[in-house]
Amino acid sequence: MTMKLYGFWRSLATYRVRTALALKGVHTEDISINLLQGGQFSEEFKAVNPQSVVPALVIDDGPPLFQSMAILEYLEETYPQPALLPRDARGRARVRGLAQIAVADGHPIIAPRVRSYLETELHLDEAARNRWCAHWMGKALEAIEGHLANAPETGRFCHGDTPTMADICMASQVIGATNYFKCDTAGLPTVMRVFRACMAIDAFDRSQPLKQPDAPRNPAH
Amino acid sequence: MTMKLYGFWRSLATYRVRTALALKGVHTEDISINLLQGGQFSEEFKAVNPQSVVPALVIDDGPPLFQSMAILEYLEETYPQPALLPRDARGRARVRGLAQIAVADGHPIIAPRVRSYLETELHLDEAARNRWCAHWMGKALEAIEGHLANAPETGRFCHGDTPTMADICMASQVIGATNYFKCDTAGLPTVMRVFRACMAIDAFDRSQPLKQPDAPRNPAH
């Protein structure tokens, strides 16, 4: 079996899939689609994903899998160890709910296509665009903090003492908020404590955007 | 067992949960949180969901379930009939991927909190705000159309001939696009064909925003 992961070093959604693959010890051939140069709009990539977004996961000659959460669920079903969802239905609902706050309520609002609309249609300057991104990244993390702070289910990680999809998705959001948009994390003690626990795990750490082979050597670029 | 659904007639995320409950024949006590009057920010509702968004599902005295996709997955696990996910892992990945395009890539960008930011922080007038909403609602539906149009898995519904989570989430997006933002649907033949098949099902139809008891009698309001 061959698995090809179409992604980009900077993409937070690709980070999520990369981390799940690393945790489960699944090897992929990685194909870099340069989102900063419009590689997602090439006819070649549109044949893989007509939506022109990464990641996409192609297994053998099957149709490409798309959307990071759908791919995480697929990996969980086909590579169940280590489990990234708890065993009980309510626990799974909590983990998926936390994951969705990052994946649905936080990330899409600051995606490249939205930043591009802010620039070309609404004529926002770079400072205003960065405020927009920092605002929504921060809001999603505040929402996660609100759920984590006083819940008995919160442990060393978002849900108990082993990492789940919630940690993967939250970590992607923290990486974006702190690396790209310099968000203030002072009001996020639980989120940042769990994030540090995640980053102490090799699979989370080596999947980081700036540690990818297609990342620029100079992080300012 | 008692189930309380906190929602609002106009909320597309509530529509998704309401439709899944109706398809599965699960009864809930419905509690209306008036999003147009800021009911989501009351201390009472924040105790249910600190993120101040609907829907939230409370079962007996358990902690509230949040995020529509997490709730759909929970309902699928606890009320498996009729199944809203296909049996095979790749099929489930496709259905979840299509659902996520609506839930993550389309809807959050036009949520009330974003429209409020456009108005109060960016000073966009109503016409510009409506263009924003129509643009992003349309983009998500175009992405779904791109996936549905030529895929052999597409049937009477998004995936085969019975409704799945993909149909529920796509239907919520079409309802928002056509009822609230008057999007042009000319480029969406497959989406609209499937949407009509959905609306011929009582559970989809009676869950519609304007058919809820807390909806205004005059749809213009």
Image (cartoon, coloured by chain):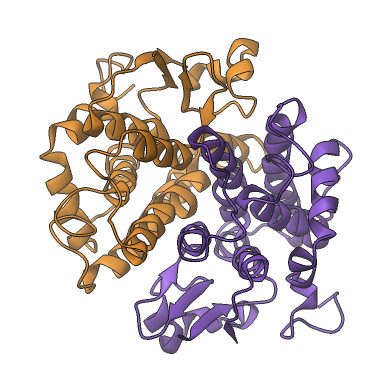
Chain colours: A orange, B purple
Viewer-proximal residue among A198 and A9: A198
Quarter occupied by the C terminus of chain B:
bottom right
Q: Residue furthest bottom?
A: B44
Query: From the viewer's perspective, is A216 left or right of A112?
Result: left
Where is the N terminus of chain B found, in terms of image quarters? Answer: bottom left
* x 77%, y 59%: residue: B175
Above or below, A51 against B107 in this view is: above
Q: Quadrant of residue A219?
A: top left
- As drawn, the residue found furthest toward the left would be A200
Q: Position of residue B96 (x, y in %)?
A: 54, 44
Residue B172 % position (x, y): 69, 58
> Residue B194: percent from the left, percent from the top?
80, 46
Q: Which residue is at 57% across, 82% downward?
A: B28
Counting the numbered discs, the total is 0
Q: In the drawing, does residue A162 fall left or right of residue B135?
A: left
Q: Nearer the viewer, residue A56 or B78?
A: B78
Classify residue B98 as left or right of residue B71: right
Residue A78 in picture, x, y percent from top left: 37, 34
Q: Is residue A68 above or below residue A169?
A: above
Residue B183 in sight: yes
> Where is A90 relative to B34, above or below?
above
Which one is nearer the viewer's eye here, A101 or A116?
A101
Residue located 24% across and 72% down the image: A151
Would residue A135 be seen by someone viewing this image from the given angle?
no
